Amino acid sequence: MKSIVLYLHAHQPWRVKPYSVFQAGSDHEYFNDQSPDTDTNNQFIIDKVSEKSYLPTNRVLTELLLKHPEFKVSLSITGTLIDQLEMWRPDVLQSFKELVATGKVEIVAETYHHSLAFFYSRSEFVKQVAKHAHKIREMFGVTPTAFRNTELSYNNDLAYWADEAGYKAIITEGWDPILGWRSPNYVYRPTFTNDIKLLMKNYNLSDDVAFRFSNQGWSEWPLSAEKYAHWLSEADGAGDVINLFMDYETFGEHQWADTGIFDFLKAFPDEWLKTPDHTFKTITEAADYYETKDSIDVPQTITWADTERDLTAWLGNGMQTDAIQALYDLEGAVLKTEDAVLIEDWRRLQTSDHVYYMCTKWSSDGDVHAYFSPYSSPYKAFMYFMNAYRDITSRLLEKGMTL
C-alpha cells in the first residue's frame, strides 16, 4: 500500500510596525499598526489571508473529507495565528475546528511562537511547546502525537528530545545530502532514539505544487491532478509514503484562486484513489503503519528553506545573529518580572519571521525572502526589530531589572 501524507502548515506572525527609536520607551504597541491596508497591519493581513486562503481551503478540505473515507490531512497551526484568529476571525478558527472534528485531521505539535528557541534556550523551547499543546487541547480537544520544529529545522538532538518527550513521529526536509542513496518515500528511525519515527518531505513533488504550480515558464505547466497523481504513483517505485509538506497558504495566497489551485486540490484525491492500493494517512498513522527502512543521522541542523537547507535563512548575517542573540540574552530578566504582557511581547519577537526578513541573500532565495517580507529592505526589518528590543529593555529597567 502506498500512502500520501499531506501536511499543511498554517502560520502568521505578529509583524512589527514601522517603529522608530523615538517610540521606544513610550509606545509599547509595536505589533499594532492601525494604518489601513498595509503589510504590517496584522488585522488586515489576517482578513486578507482568511478570505483568499483559509476559508476556501477549509471548505474544499471539508468536502474532500466527507466525500472520501480514505482522505486524511495533517496540519500545524501556530499559537500566533490562533491568537489572531481568536481576536479578529473567530469564523475561520471555527472552520479549523470543524475540520479537526471530522476525526480525520491530525494537528502536529510545535513551538507556540514559531521560534528558534531550541537553538538558544532549551527551557524556553520546552515552555513554548507545552504552551502550544495546551492551546491545541483547549481549542480542538486533541493532544498532538507528532512533532515539527519551526521551519522543519531538525538535528539528532531534536529527535532525541522528541523521542524522550513521547512523540510517535517527527518530520523534516528530505534533503539529498542527508538521505544519500536513500529515498524520502519511506519511514525512518532517527539515530540515538528508541521509539520515534521520522518522515521526510519529498521536496521535489511538494514544490511542484507549492512553488511551480502557477509558473507558466515551467516545462510541466499546467499541472493537472491526473498528471500529478501519475507522478506520485511512479515516485520511487515501491516506496511506502509520499510526504507532501507545504504551507497552508499555498492554496489561495501563494497560488491564487485564478491559477486553478482549488480545482486541482478538489480533483487530486479522486485521481490518487483510482488505484486500489493508494490511500492517505496522517503523520502518526504512517509512523504506526510502516516499518522503518533505515536510520537517519543528522548531526548538523537542516531546514526546508533556501538552497542550503540550513539555518542561514534566519542566521546568515550579522544583523540576524546579533538581533536574535540580544533577544535571548534578556530571557532571565524578562521571566523574572512575571509580567505576562512583557513576556508575551518578548516571545512575539522570538518568531522566526522577524530575522527571516533581515536576510540579505541574493538570487532566487533573496526573491523569496523579499516576497514574504512586509518591509522595503532587510535593514528596515532590523531597525524596527531593534527599536522594539530597546523598548523591551526600557521596560525591564523601569522594573529595576539588571541587564
Image: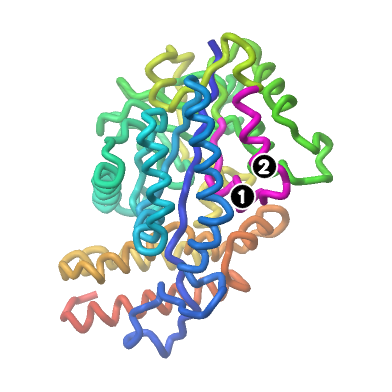
The residue closer to the viewer here, 254 or 156, is 254
* Stretch in magenta: 244-270
Magenta stretch: residue 135 in it?
no
Magenta stretch: residue 253 in it?
yes
**In this picture, residue 241 sits left or right of residue 142:** right
Residue 241 in sight: yes
Give x and y (percent) for residue 90: 38, 56
Residue lying at 47% horizontally and 76% vertically, measured from the top left = 17
Give x and y (percent) for residue 280: 51, 22
Residue lying at 20% horizontally and 84% vertically, measured from the top left = 398
Residue 115 in sight: no
Residue position for label 1: 252
Give x and y (percent) for residue 54: 51, 49
Q: Are marks 1 and 2 in contact (CB under 8 Å)?
A: yes
| Rendered view: 377 above or below 278 | below
**Which image quadrant: the C terminus?**
bottom left
Residue position for label 2: 261
| Rendered view: 271 above or below 319 | above
**Quadrant housing residue 380:** bottom right
The residue closer to the viewer here, 111 or 319, is 111
